Amino acid sequence: MLSKIKKAMRGEGGFTLIELMVVILIIGILIAIAVPSFIAIRNRGYQAQAKSNLRNGVTASAAYGTDHEGDYTGMTAAILHNEYEASVTFADGAGAVVNTVYISGLGADAYVLTVTARDGSVYTATKAAGAGITYNF
């Protein structure tokens, strides 16, 4: 009995090349399934951040409009950032810097806010004269 154990211990042990290749193949398949899911989740996070910045920009714009009797013509990025919403980066005009809220279309009772998410999605909030705010999500 002891000789059988000694003989078994002297034998070659380990995995064959085929077994290792099968394990690597299975790991590769699992990665191929998981990576697109992680990318989609990351992109949803980028989009949520941009939408949040846009909503905060709308809130700051509403506060500005309240203080100026509904007239948005003097609203600038510096005023919104410094006086109403310091957590959001604002810019005047048009552009596509990620998560920056761009202010355009200013009027007596109108404005357009635009933001670009890190994944390239563009969202807008439009306040038309005499109307409410329309979001383009």
Image (cartoon, grey):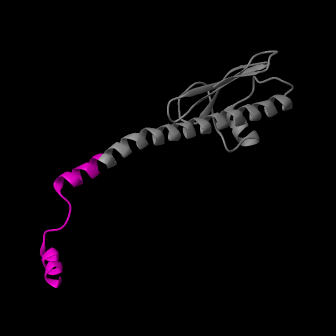
Q: Main secondary structure of the magenta part?
A: helix
Image position, residue 85 (x, y; %): 72, 41
**Relative to 18, does residue 35 appear above or below in the rendering?**
above
> Is 86 part of what is drawn in magenta?
no
- State the extent of the magenta-drawn residues as a range: 1-25
Specify the quadrant of the image occupied by residue 84. top right
Specify the quadrant of the image occupied by residue 116. top right
Total tally of numbered discs in the picture: 0
Horizontal arrangement in the rendering, residue 66 relative to residue 36 (left or right): right
Quadrant containing the C terminus in the rendered view: top right
Image position, residue 26 (x, y; %): 32, 47
Horizontal arrangement in the rendering, residue 112 relative to residue 68 (left or right): left
The residue lying at 19 percent from left, 51 percent from top is: 18
Towards the viewer: 72 or 43: 43
> Is 12 part of what is drawn in magenta?
yes
Quadrant containing the N terminus in the rendered view: bottom left
Horizontal arrangement in the rendering, residue 74 relative to residue 7 (left or right): right
Considering every residue shown, the one lying at the far bottom of the view is: 2
Towards the viewer: 42 or 69: 42
Image position, residue 118 (x, y; %): 51, 36
Image position, residue 47 (x, y; %): 58, 35
The residue lying at 40 percent from left, 40 percent from top is: 33
Towards the viewer: 130 or 26: 26
Towards the viewer: 40 or 117: 40
**Relative to 12, does residue 30 appear above or below in the rendering?**
above
The residue lying at 17 percent from left, 84 percent from top is: 2
Specify the quadrant of the image occupied by residue 61. top right
Horizontal arrangement in the rendering, residue 23 relative to residue 88 (left or right): left
Considering every residue shown, the one lying at the far front of the view is: 1
